[in-house]
Amino acid sequence: MERTQIKDVFAKKGEVELQGWVHDTRDLSKIRFLVLKDVTGRIQTIGIKGETSEEVFDLMDKVPRESAVKIIGELKDSKQAPGGKEVLIKELEIIAEAEQPLPIDVSDHSKTELPKRLDNRFLDLHRERTQAIFKIQSTMMQAYREFMIQEGAVEAVFPSIIGSSSEGGTETFKMKYFEKTAFLSQSCQLYKQMLACSMEKVFTIFSVWRAEKHNTIRHLNEARQFDYEEGFADEFKVMKVMGECVQYIVKKILEERKSELELLDVKLKVPKIKYLTFEEVDELMKKNKTPMEKYDLTNEAEGKLDDLFPDTIVFVHDWPLAKKPFYIMPKDKKDSKGNQLSCGFDAIYKGIELSSGGQRIHIPDLLVERLKVNNLNPKDFKGYIDSFRYGAPPHAGWGMGLERLTMMVLGLKNIREGVLFPRDRDRLTP
Ligand code: AMO
């Protein structure tokens, strides 16, 4: 007999074989219930004293929760059973017994705190709620790929070990690389730029490592980014691509992950798009008595943008050059206070920075100048600078945090909820 996954069982008749985990058991003395779950759903299975073999009926009382089991039984219509069907057990086999007590509570209303759940992530993943988050994240990645392929972009892979910093200002993890010093990649920035100068539209899902000692609900030391770069483009062209990309991803989630959204009690809307200059945001914040940094948004300002423009991706562009990385193109323009502006932007969604990007410098001499201003040594970037000497067109792009997107779309309180195996300042295992 072949195994049937639970989602397919409701359309069947007669005898079925199921394999899954024991979610719950109940003993009403003459009837015993065992709720079986697999990744596709749950079904009630029952044993009846006198009808079910004594051996199976006994085992139903002993089998520990979360054990993996195989059940062969007869499908019956049942008005009381969720889904209108239940399985009268004929055979019950324990495939892998779960030791007791379980290290965490994996019931639907578990109160186990996040750090303990993360310590036992393998078991936390038995929960429907946890699974729902990662099913939705999987849809996000698939939708991102689909969208990019429809855009005519080429998927690329880039090195994770780099010879020099790619995001000046952000700390790197140093490592020994034979006789040299190398770093774990902070981003694929320099590589995606070099590629866009020949392949025009490129994208990737890339792991980044940031050695920042923060311990916040929105930062990780290892994160994933959706990266995009386009040749013959400025920041406005790629902001439009990003807005449409997130709208596409959200539409896919709404279409394909209805039950997971319901389970997580998430009311999701396709985001609107808004464009504001940094100076316009500064004025808005003054009006709303919300603090700002000189060249940056505060967390409060990001939150205020969400209050003012709910369910909207707010692109804040014409950002002061002083707070943008060395590779961002300066703008031939100053704001009313005389601050030099840049072609860089941040995208704020649901009160948090979802992405940053901009038009890049494709002019070698200007790049050398900007590296020096940022206290970086142009010698360390020789290969990168030289790549722009042979017909490199203007180009632009962005990086969007996968875990940030997961967190915002699902309203998670801590970014770690949206990472299978998070790496933060204290966590290296599991
Ligand atoms: P940036 O450093 O702003 O830009 O990163 C882009 C986006 O990646 C996510 N992100 C993070 N998520 C969780 N924890 C972190 N420590 C973390 N750091 C970044 C955020 C952020 O907006 N190369 C540029 C992008 C570009 O210009 O193309 C870059 O990496 O969502």
Image (cartoon, helix red, strand yellow):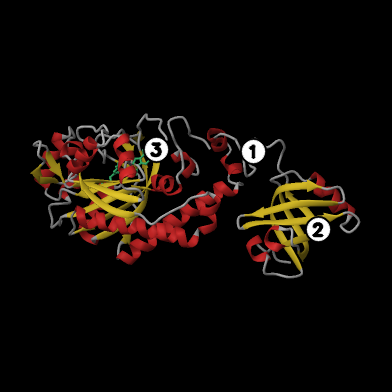
Q: Quadrant of residue 148?
A: bottom left
Q: Quadrant of residue 249?
A: bottom left
Q: Is residue 181 visible?
A: no
Q: If you read the primary sequence from the N terminus, does the residue marked by circle 1 or circle 2 appear first?
A: 2
Rendered-image quarter of ligand 1: top left
Instruction: Please tell me whether mark 3 or mark 2 is closer to you in this view.
Output: 3
| Left or right of 12, for residue 404 | left
Q: Which residue is mark 3?
A: 218
Q: Position of residue 50 (x, y in %)?
A: 91, 56
Q: Nearer the viewer, residue 279 or 220?
A: 279
Q: Position of residue 11 (x, y in %)?
A: 67, 69
Q: Amino acid at mark 3?
A: Arg
Q: Amino acid at mark 2?
A: Glu
Report if the beta carbon of the residue with label 2 is closer than 8 angstroms to ligand 1.
no
Circles 3 and 2 in contact, beta carbons < 8 Å: no
The mark found on residue 91 in the picture is: 2
Report if the beta carbon of the residue with label 3 is closer than 8 angstroms to ligand 1.
yes
Where 87 sits versus 66, above or below? below
Q: Amino acid at mark 1?
A: Asp
Q: Which residue is mark 1?
A: 105
Question: Callout 1: few (<14), some (14-19), or many (20+) C-alpha neighbours within 10 Å?
Answer: some
Work out how far the residue at label 3 is from the one at label 2, CA to CA, in angstroms. 48 Å
Q: If you read the primary sequence from the N terminus, does the residue marked by circle 3 or circle 1 appear first?
A: 1
Q: Position of residue 197 (x, y in %)?
A: 20, 57
Where 156 sits versus 112, above or below? below
